[in-house]
Amino acid sequence: MCSKSRFGVFSSGIQSIPHIDQFLNADLQKIWCFTQANLEGVVGWGLKPTAEKARRFAAKKNLPYIALEDGFLRSVGLGVDGDVPHSLVVDYSGIYYDATRPSDLERFIFESALSDEQAIRARRCMALIRKHRLSKYNQAPEVMFAPSDKQRILVVDQTAGDASIRYGLASEHSFKLMLEQAKANHPDAEIWVKIHPDVLAGKKQGHLVELAQHLGCTLLSDACNPWSVLDVVSDVYVVTSQLGFEALLAGKRVHCFGMPFYAGWGLTEDSQSCARRSVERSLEAVFDAAYIRYCRFINPQSGQRCEIEDTIALLTQQRDLLF
């Protein structure tokens, strides 16, 4: 058994995450009065303003700042409702949604050289996610949409103030451009605009509700499993939403108006560019880097680290109990 690291933390919220010591393989020590000694790093939540104190302290003490975020297969219910996370990402050099500088995930993708076994495992896990129709959150029911003679196009909104927008080389204006471009590219199609689950829950604000109504788009205002929508659309337009990557798993054409982690590798049609992403990568390579190597998984029932396959099985079991 490897010895645990010793990390400092300012946030009581991070300390209270169930099984956080197992996620990090570290003991977390609350930093008081800037006097904590013998630390090997400082942990904070991504690039949120609430983590600024942790980032400043890490820089002052010449310690690594270790950024945490929810994993890409997080839980059944929403994090804002207190559902326990099944996965976290832990990044020592940046964070996956920040395209302004390198991150561990970007390096994993850039340096990817999958073995045959790794490629087979990635394809198998992608197939399991498709089969069980899993997403970051998994509390929304399946919906059967009526057939249509028209092509259907999905445009994905995000919550206002989402850090991935600013750090993904985009802005509030990017959403307007995206929706207008989708209309221009597909003048005879039905344009559907999907609202983020936190907006539907009344906890946050989005960007596209009013513009979508003005342009005569169909607003997806009821919670539904995103795979239900992916079943019936041909193209998906995103700024930086993770749903764009799930659309790639579903075999859809994906248009990016920001620079999410899966853009810039030859898999998407991009309106932005990132000079560091100068190579093409397969979907299996990006999936392996993001979902298998970058994410850390915990079985919240046992409190022990596990593999992505275990998390897929447990999330499926828990989700199926809801319906």
Image (cartoon, rainbow, N blue to C red):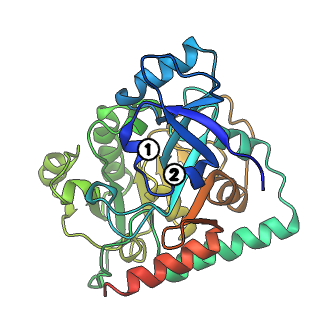
Q: Which residue is located at x 41 percent, y 74 percent?
A: 227
Q: For this rendering, which residue is in front, 185 or 42?
A: 42
Q: Amino acid at mark 1?
A: Gln
70 sits left or right of 106 in the view: left
Q: Is residue 273 above or below residue 133?
A: above
Graded by Cα atoms within 10 Å as few (under 14), some (14 to 19) or many (20 or more), the crowding at tag 2 reads: some
Element type at mark 2: helix
Residue sitting farthest toward the top: 60
CB under 8 Å between discs 1 and 2: yes
Q: Which residue is mark 2?
A: 20
Q: Which residue is mark 1?
A: 15
Q: Which residue is located at x 41 percent, y 81 percent?
A: 318
Q: Which residue is located at x 37 percent, y 77 percent?
A: 228
Assign the N terminus to one quadrant of the image. bottom right
Q: For this rendering, which residue is in front, 169 or 49?
A: 49
Q: Position of residue 72 (x, y in %)?
A: 51, 58
